[in-house]
Amino acid sequence: QIQSVPQSFLWVNTFTVSDMGEPHTQEHLLIGKGNKGRNVNSTEGMSMGQSNASTYQTLTNYQMNTSAGSEVFYKLFGEYLDALLNPDYTEEEVRREVRNWGVTEDADKSLRLEEKGSVYNEMVSSTTQPNRRFYIMAKQMVYGEKHPLSYNAGGSPQGIREMKPDHI
């Protein structure tokens, strides 16, 4: 009986099948890409709403709320569910969100090719942290290298490089 802003917490069982990070990529695509994902983001901003998503070893969760009242919440919640259940992102959005090549300008004004992509950049950063590397190695020691619970749910940089839209 605690009064608070209207909110939801959903989770989906998302078992990992490789180190390519399919569940993590899907999390990014569902709430940010395609016309429906972009619409949710626009509506959320205008509805005083907030959302967040996280991918774990066996599930992905989606949280959202709004302080604009229940009528606005249910409209936003409906759009959010539609984006999750009926995505309309494109294969090109998958390629760009996962990993792609881009041109970067260095301080000396020279240009170079660089690997980019939200999922790739996030996981490169994550896998360089010593505690994260220890966690990944410990899972492999406990479960073995090809066990679903030993895979990196977010994706390893090497695995992400192999991912294609068909894998999603």
Image: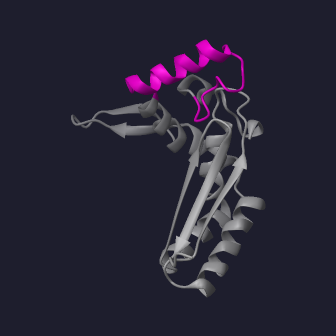
Name which residue lies at 54% across and 71% down. Answer: 65
Residue at the outermost front position: 1
Is 96 displayed left or right of 133 in the figure? Answer: right
Relative to 45, is 97 above or below? above
Is 17 displayed left or right of 123 in the figure? Answer: right
Q: Nearer the viewer, residue 143 or 107?
A: 143
Q: Quadrant of the N terminus?
A: bottom right
Name which residue lies at 54% across and 40% down. Answer: 119
Relative to 22, is 148 above or below? above
Residue 120 in sight in this render: yes
Q: Position of residue 9 (x, y in %)?
A: 62, 61
Q: Position of residue 133 (x, y in %)?
A: 46, 22
Q: Position of residue 117 (x, y in %)?
A: 51, 41
Residue 117 in magenta stretch? no
Which quarter of the figure has residue 131?
top left
Q: Nearer the viewer, residue 82 or 140?
A: 140
Relative to 154, is 77 above or below? below
Q: Quadrant of the C terminus?
A: top right
Which quarter of the figure has residue 82?
bottom right
Residue 32 in sight in this render: no
Residue 134 in magenta stretch? yes
Name which residue lies at 59% across and 20% down. Answer: 139
Q: Position of residue 149 (x, y in %)?
A: 67, 26
Magenta-drawn segment: 127-155
Total marks drawn? 0
Name which residue lies at 71% across and 66% down. Answer: 81
Q: Nearer the viewer, residue 139 or 155?
A: 139
